Amino acid sequence: MNGGNEKFTGNEAALMQQFEIIKEFFQKDSGSEMIGSLHAMVESFLFAENLNQVTPEMREHIVNQLRVATLVAQLENSYNGFKKL
């Protein structure tokens, strides 16, 4: 050990950089807050009064919103698990 100033190489440096990005991401809002916002957007879209029919493009947007929500949840779980180490 070098007084806490160990040098990371290869994958370790990349992992630390990814962790810092995720850490900054969740310092703004929690994963549950982001997921709630995504779901609110989808719900407002689905229940709009002028929505006559759901087009294939709309369905694709809805699926993408749900995928983003899943990604945020997985990132938050990984971040919480990693910071406990």
Image (cartoon, rainbow, N blue to C red):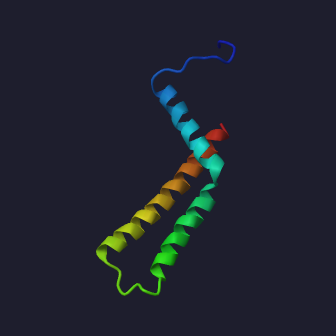
Nearest the camera: 62 or 83?
Answer: 62
Q: Where residue 5 sits in the image (x, y, percent)?
A: 64, 17
The quadrant of the rendering that contains the N terminus is: top right
Q: Residue furthest left?
A: 56
Q: Is residue 49 left or right of residue 21?
A: left
Q: Is residue 57 left or right of residue 43?
A: left
Q: Is residue 82 left or right of residue 17?
A: right
Place residue 62 in its image quadrant: bottom left
Q: Does 3 appear above or below 11?
A: above
Q: Where residue 65 sits in the image (x, y, percent)?
A: 45, 64
Q: Where residue 29 sits in the image (x, y, percent)?
A: 63, 54
Q: Residue furthest right?
A: 3
Q: Residue at x 58, y 36 (%)?
A: 20
Nearest the camera: 67 or 78?
Answer: 67
Q: Does 42 appear above or below 17?
A: below
Q: Residue at x 36, y 73 (%)?
A: 58
The quadrant of the rendering that contains the C terminus is: top right
Q: Where residue 83 sits in the image (x, y, percent)?
A: 65, 40
Q: Is residue 16 left or right of residue 46?
A: right
Place residue 81 in its image quadrant: top right
Nearest the camera: 53 or 81?
Answer: 53
Q: Residue at x 61, y 48 (%)?
A: 26
